[in-house]
Amino acid sequence: MRRRRSIGLVAVVVLLAVVCILSLAVGSKPIPLHIVLDDLWHHGDTSDDGIVIWSLRMPRTALGLAVGIALGLAGALMQSLTRNPLADPGLLGVNAGAAAAVVAAIGILGLTSPSAYIWFALIGAAIASVTVYVLGSRGNSAATPVRLALAGAAISAVLGSFVSAIVLTDQQTFDSFRFWSVGALAGQPTSVLWGTGPFMAVGAVLALALARPLNALSLGDDAGRALGAHLGRTRALSVLSVTLLCGAATAAAGPIGFVGLTVPHIARAITGPDQRWIFPYSALLAPILLLGSDVVGRVLARPGELEVGIVTAFVGAPVFIALVRRRRLVQI
């Protein structure tokens, strides 16, 4: 089993490399694969193809890779934390908090540049997650998965109403917000990745470190405690990791759906219920889905393109439905 998982992980890495190369080659200006590989090997080409690859498509591919890893890990972590196979990174109110902060930045402060309100999205996601955790841990009992999910649903509903109230009464805010809310990798400056990358990196390290205690908690609170897992600390760090991963990814590319929901199920179908393998597989499979959807969006609407948030919905939803219909999902 361990050998099969290792071989599968290597195959996924190779597939991810292929998708990254396709992301550099496909677009309104198609570039032959041999030119892409040559430019990657001899960096510094000043030809038109070299400028397109290094100035436009390389930052876009790097952003898609980082956001995909973050969403995949956040989804796997959320499903393990809440023991809910339908949990996604937005369950703790992270997406709603980021959206509310972006709307406030646009509607109240008049900011319109993605690089200007990226910090508002991060702060909004953090405040929403902390609020959810505080509400879920009030009283005599600890922050159980059910209480966290209920608190997240309540906060998301409140913040969703706030967003609707502003965008439906201010046309200018609505016009600016709708482009961010659909989810896109195109047109993002390199500063966006440099600004959000450190948060995603810290969140990813935290998530991978939590795989073993989450394995213990999957047996139940009493069994997990008996195996040496610290319930409160594990859940608090999990919420912090989801906040960093999902908050930074949402701030960078907008709320992109179905990646964090679908990918952990694919990983779990390959590896079984062991989080030590689910997390690495999710971190590699998610950018494959995200970058692959981005490439498909460029092909379908050439010379224009469909935003990646739209394509992931069309690609991820059938995959998830097929997983549910064709085989029994591995239990969390």
Image (cartoon, grey):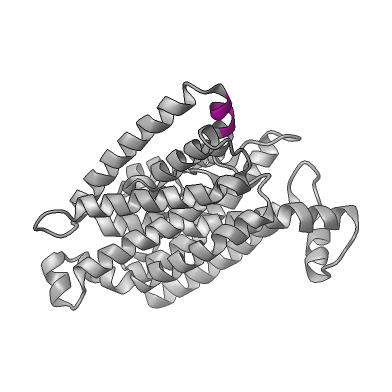
**Which residue appears farthest toward the right when viewing the image?**
47
Q: In this view, does 56 lie above or below 175?
A: below
Q: Position of residue 223 (x, y in %)?
A: 13, 71
Q: Residue at x 58, y 26 (%)?
A: 172
Q: In which quarter of the image is residue 42?
A: bottom right
Q: Is residue 40 magenta?
A: no
- Count the marks: how many? 0
Image check: 45 left or right of 263? right
Viewer-side residue, 58 vs 85: 58
Q: Where is residue 138 in the image (x, y as percent from the top left)?
A: 16, 54
Q: Where is residue 330 in the image (x, y as percent from the top left)?
A: 29, 56
Q: Which residue is drawn at 42% across and 27% down?
A: 164
Q: In which quarter of the image is the N terminus?
A: bottom left
Q: Which residue is drawn at 47% across and 22% down?
A: 168
Image check: 167 left or right of 30? left
Q: Is residue 174 magenta?
A: yes
Main SS type for the magenta part? helix
**Which residue appears farthest toward the front when viewing the image?**
109
Q: Quadrant of residue 318?
A: top left
Residue stretch in magenta: 172-176
Q: Residue at x 13, y 76 (%)?
A: 226
Residue 268 in view in this figure: no
Residue 9 in view in this figure: yes
**Which residue appears farthest toward the left when viewing the image?**
140
Q: Where is residue 147 in the image (x, y as percent from the top left)?
A: 19, 50
Viewer-side residue, 322 vs 162: 162
Q: Quadrant of the C terminus?
A: bottom left
